[in-house]
Amino acid sequence: MSTTVYIPADASAAAVGAEQVAERIRAEASTRGADVRIVRNGSRGLFWLEPLVEVATGTGRQAYGPVTVADVPGLFDAGFLSGNSHPLSHGLTDSIPYLKKQQRLTFARVGIVDPASVDDYVAHGGYQGLKRALGMDGASIVKEVTDSGLRGRGGAAFPTGIKWKTVLDQPPQQKYVTCNADEGDSGTFSDRMLMEGDPLSLVEGMTIAGIAVGATRGFIYLRVEYPHAYRALGKAIAAARAAGYLGRDVLGSGKEFELSVRLGAGAYICGEETSMLESLEGRRGEVRVRPPLPAIKGLFGQPTIVNNVISLATVPVILARGSTFYKDFGVGRSRGTLPLQLAGNLKHCGLVELAFGPPLREILYDFGGGSLSGRPLRAVQVGGPLGAYLPASQFDTAVDYEALSGIGALLGHGGIVAFDDTVDMLQMARYAMEFCAVESCGKCTPCRIGSTRGVEVIDRIRQGIDREKNISVLSDLCDTMQYGSLCGLGGMAPFPVKSALKHFASDFTGRPA
Amino acid sequence: MSTLDPRLESTVRTIAERFKDQPGPLLEVLHAVQGAIGYVPSGAVPVIASALNLSRAEVHGVVSFYHHFRHSAPGQHIVRICRAEACQSVNGAVTEAHAKRRLGIDYHQTTADGRYSLEPVYCLGNCACAPSVMIDETVHGRVTPQRLDELLS
């Protein structure tokens, strides 16, 4: 009987050598005449252990990592195919505390299943949500999503069910379901991991959305920087179609849903929903003025759902297990779970899915293990490049939408980037303005001009030119951008700048030499 | 606006014809043209415009809006250095400076021997294994200056 060995095909695992390890294990197995079946799974999200190789045994999957090509013969010698111990052993994967302490709902299958296999997906609870949805009318499906309390995981946290209801309420006509997979925030990779590790949950979520609101056509707008995800989605969509889960007659229900992937072209702004629609239509990704809302007049002028990858991929579990099950996780108005992404200067970077509400400190130290460099953590940026920088005095803030917005920060797409005490916060503020200048679509003046002026003003502060006056100019400029911009790029780029000014003022006023 | 040589023009025209009946096909066409030729030559703009029934200004506007589309032939290999926060937090700027020094070029330039083009990129989604560098289609993680030297040699 063959032994199953799991080696992630995840882009980050590949970036640290998973492809070479997979090849070496294949070659070594063949030399030794070992009967090995290699499955290229997604990542479990324990990136400091990647490449993480798992072996299926009678008692569960045994984990070994980080495995290099040079370790492979030793692993065979030690009998890793029987789950035997080795210096790289971590025991049963599911017992690793980082994983065991999580509440994985959206990521339940990521790293477990073969991403390209519909059979494996179904064997792990996949497509139960769609099957249930096919027996319900559109309004009941939308109600289930509304009742679950699911809010947009892209960053804006708008209630998903309310968006869907607006589309459902439009008279029958061509409607669209679009997935915003333009995950451009630094420090975020949950969309990528999900699309690479369990793409069928996104496919199922979009199919349910289509059935719910009467949309027959879906598009996934994927950033071009994600070639692995592009391939994984292509395979998953083809497999779903071949198995009857997509197409003219979804599972014999008489309902139609077809899905395709469109690539972006390296524009951060296309993560803004109206820019994304412009880009999908083949135009410059310039922000549209709202109203009309995309739900009423969206893609090609038709009613359109625009949801993030994680929002859509969470829909199957809500439909399969019910809104109450999902709603029971979380706190206050932040219901359910959020896949947090730990990145930057932390020992244990990775994906941590938890119910909303744990203190940031627990995430940074219990999961993240503190700084990678061993120096004290000084600043943490939560919510991507437009998110505020939090000083250590705010590490006890709860990780939920309301608690973070209460201190002038935001949760966004759940990215957490940590910096140690060598960080220069004036430089980070300058970078925020520079990034906004590079990525501004140019449509509105506060964002287009303000960001460039922001870089210049910060440079003057750096040089010590009229420091006090220029700090006050910078604050004014931040207000102009925040209140005068058309969309969140210019409107939120001031958050990192203002928070740096507020909490790390000494970096702007000249530090002791 | 330069004109394309007939072979390239026919390539561009074939691609545009292939996509023209899809809804909003321009980005798809530009991706395919860049995939086939390596960049989007200015001479391709009128060919695409005529095939898709768009103005040249509309096509040029789209080509120039997106960072991914190149206007001239790149080097044999494209080296993209991630400049975003997560990479900065683990000394990405050191890797960035090293790349510029070693290749002797700045961003958006190509080495004199035509081997490498250097481009900035803002996040590759590899933030848990930063700093990140993408060479052609392959992402590399935990790239120190020393590791970059290995990758480029």
Image: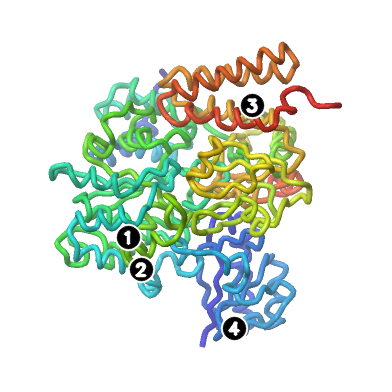
In which quadrant of the rendered image does the C terminus of chain A lie? Answer: top right
Q: Can residue A190 be seen in this view?
A: yes
* Same chain, labels 4 and 1: yes
Q: Examine the image and state in which quarter residue A240 appears.
A: bottom left
Are the residues tagged 3 and 2 within 8 Å (C-beta)?
no
Residue labelled with disc 2: A126
Against A240, residue B150 (above or below) is above
Q: Residues within 10 Å of mark 1 (few under 14, many from 20)?
A: many
Q: Residues within 10 Å of mark 2 (few under 14, many from 20)?
A: many
- Which tag is nearer the camera, tag 4 or tag 1? 1
Q: Residues within 10 Å of mark 3 (few under 14, many from 20)?
A: many
Check residue A204 in the rendering and tell me which mark sits there, or answer none.
Answer: 1
Tell me the element at label 4: loop
- Which tag is nearer the camera, tag 4 or tag 2? 2
Q: Earlier in the sequence, mark 3 or mark 2?
A: 2
Q: Where is residue A44 in the image (x, y as percent from the top left)?
A: 55, 64
